[in-house]
Image: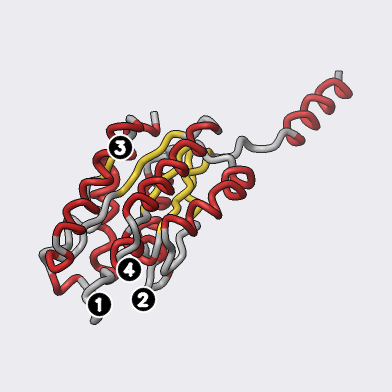
């Protein structure tokens, strides 16, 4: 009897804890926490919210400052294999737009990333971006590209990642491009409605 109990105890202690499902974030400086500490950036705050809500997910943030959709596309395949995410958040395109890169290439890259993620069984959320009005018709086509892709791919879209802070210059760093740490909770609140339904 004692031996049987010992075997049961050994079995249960040997079983590994179930790993939390991964939310993989592929973004640029807006998600990498440029100019602030990494733990202050919205992906880290998202990870804390998941823990607070006792949801079985954890965040892996592979965002890189200066990243384009082409760079994200090249890195995504190895990332999908390494982390096997349940959810992929794609927050890229801002640097394509600021550099005036061809939108057909940006759309192709985003579509490829979404399709590759779906092929692994991951669900996808995409965050859109806007450009300053002085970019003219290019800015309109740029912004519209995200909605078109989301509709075609049937995925949730966060229309504009910076929507809750864009009209509040006091929440931006001196470059007027990157939000301060004080703005990051607002970004999490903005991302959450698109992401939360996928966590069930």
Few, some or many residues within 10 Å of mark 2 (<14, 14–19, 20+): some
152 vs 55, nearest the viewer: 152
**Residue that lies at the very extreme toward the right in this rendered image:** 3
* Disc 1 secondary structure class: loop
Q: Which residue is mark 2?
A: 35
Q: Position of residue 184 (x, y in %)?
A: 28, 62
Q: Which residue is mark 1?
A: 173
Q: Position of residue 105 (x, y in %)?
A: 39, 52
Measured along the vertical axis of the image, is residue 4 above or below residue 87?
A: above
Residue 186 in view here: no
* Label 2, label 3: how far apart the Cα atoms are: 30 Å
Foreground: disc 4 or disc 2: 4
| Residue contact at pointers 4 and 2, CB within 8 angstroms | no
Q: Earlier in the sequence, mark 2 or mark 3?
A: 2
58 vs 177, nearest the viewer: 177
| Residue contact at pointers 1 and 2, CB within 8 angstroms | yes
Q: Which residue is mark 4?
A: 99
């Amino acid at each position: 009897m004692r031996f049987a109990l010992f075997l049961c105890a050994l079995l249960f202690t040997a079983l590994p804890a179930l790993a939390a499902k991964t939310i993989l974030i592929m973004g640029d400086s807006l998600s990498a926490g440029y100019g602030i500490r990494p733990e202050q950036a919205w992906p880290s705050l998202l990870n804390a919210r998941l823990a607070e809500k006792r949801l079985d997910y954890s965040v892996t943030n592979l965002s890189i400052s200066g990243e384009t959709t082409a760079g994200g596309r090249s890195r995504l395949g190895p990332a999908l294999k390494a982390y096997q995410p349940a959810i992929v958040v794609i927050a890229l395109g801002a640097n394509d737009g600021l550099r005036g890169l061809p939108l057909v290439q940006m759309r192709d890259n985003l579509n490829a990333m979404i399709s590759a993620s779906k092929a692994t069984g991951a669900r996808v959320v995409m965050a859109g971006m806007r450009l300053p009005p002085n970019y003219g018709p290019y800015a309109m086509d740029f912004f519209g590209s995200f909605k078109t892709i989301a509709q075609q791919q049937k995925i949730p879209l966060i229309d504009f990642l910076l929507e809750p802070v864009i009209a509040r210059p006091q929440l931006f760093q001196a470059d007027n491009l990157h939000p301060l740490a004080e703005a990051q909770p607002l970004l999490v609140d903005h991302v959450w409605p698109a992401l939360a339904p996928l966590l069930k």
